[in-house]
Image (cartoon, helix red, strand yellow):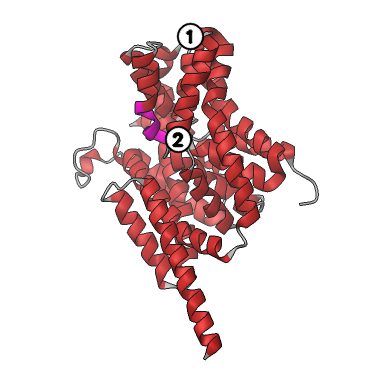
Amino acid sequence: MVYLQLLWSFFQIGLFSFGGGYAAMPLIQHQVVELRGWLTMTQFSDIVTISQMTPGPIAINSATFVGIRVAGLPGAVVATLGCVLPSCIIVMALAFLYERYRGLSLVQGILGGLRPAVVAMIASAGISLLVLALWGEDVTSLTDPQQVQWPSVAIFAAGFLVLRKWKPDPILILLGSGAAGIVLYSLV
Amino acid sequence: MEKRPYRALFLSTFQLSAFTFGGGYVIVPLMRKKFVDQLHWLEEQEMLDLTAIAQSAPGPIAVNASILVGYHVAGVLGALLTMLGTVMPPLIIISVISLFYAAFRDNYFVNLAMIGMQAGVAAIICDVVISMALNIWKQHRLLPVLVLAGAFAATQFLDVNMILVILVCGCIGAADTCRRGRQLRKEGKA
């Protein structure tokens, strides 16, 4: 019974969260805190914090977290399954249509209009991330040099140069910058 | 593709997902580096198409994009494998963390590593955005550049809903194709 509730709640979260990331947050909060009472508001804000600190989409992270609290590991698996099931069905259908019809000139035109828009949206998301990385969360003024996190600037610059010059596996950049974070911020 | 690279599909998405902090778009530049630059499974244009589709469908973008890449490379089974590869790292990590999450959240060294990785992710995104913007620029057409600038202004400064941006840009592309088609036919008649 509780498994069915988990499946259904996270199925709805998966189905109605367009735009990904933080767009899903109010939906998760509504289902998990208000409707079912599986988490308190404090626990919910903890899972948001942890989601920022760990890899993976916030919807999957909270599905796992809530599932485990409510019904152990099987609960986590069921909730995660519910969360990805809508994507799985809808996206697979879209993938089929794309592979089949992308040769049509009208579809080509539509995709041609979308490509620059996608680049723009990635750029926009990148800028928010860059600000967060180089100035931190509590920034009040971007021009105040005291608020710039210089070790992060150094890691960013080094990572960027290495990427442009040697084109390494991005995983190496992430591991390296994590290690550099520990070393540099311990020294400061 | 002669042999369907099931194992490589699962392992590469598992790896990417395990290191994709922050969610949302962050995984797209990583995927582009891995699948377009390193493994050559996709063309850059295809990666952008798949990203647009991933964005327009409900659900986490990371999951959607990996399903699309998996399907493109190796059909339905490929899609299921990449989805599994993307979902498993957060499932495992959060399961472990939920046992002692207060200690994790407040750990000094974990926090330092996270801060460092944020800077690393920002570097990767900058690198990829520059490469992609240069490719758009190299088409030597005004419209894609205008669409890029307009879409950027709309999302960055005006806070317009991304679904709306996608819809409008798709319509612009369709209208442009119709216009150019008519022009070609006119020139053919004359």
Against A145, residue B90 (above or below) is above
Assess disc 2: are there few (<14), some (14-19) or many (≥20) residues with their C-alpha within 10 Å of its C-alpha: many
Between residues B78 and A12, which one lies in front from this camera angle? A12
Figure quadrant of residue B117: top left
Specify whether A39 is left or right of A80: left
Which residue extends farthest bottom? B190
Residue positioned 38% across, 26% down in the render:
A27
Provide the residue span drawn in magenta.
A21-26
Between residues B117 and A71, which one lies in front from this camera angle? A71
Residue behind mark 1: A70
Q: Position of residue B36 (x, y in %)?
A: 61, 53
Secondary structure type for disc 2:
loop
Specify whether B129 is left or right of B3: left
Q: Position of residue A6 (x, y in %)?
A: 50, 16
Q: Nearer the viewer, mark 1 or mark 2?
A: 1
Q: Main secondary structure of the magenta part?
A: helix
User: Which image quarter holds the C terminus of chain A?
Assistant: top left
**Which numbered dot is residue A155?**
none
The chain identifier of the residue carrying mark 2 reads B
Which residue extends farthest front? B189
Amino acid type, callout 1: Val
Residue A25 visible at all: yes
Assess disc 1: are there few (<14), some (14-19) or many (≥20) residues with their C-alpha within 10 Å of its C-alpha: some
Residue behind mark 2: B23
Specify whether B133 is left or right of A86: left
Amino acid type, callout 2: Gly
The chain identifier of the residue carrying mark 1 reads A
Residue positioned 46% across, 57% down in the render:
A114
Is B44 contained in the magenta span?
A: no
Residue positioned 66% across, 48% down in the render:
B72
Against A66, residue B109 (above or below) is below
> Alpha-carbon distance for marks 1 and 2?
24 Å
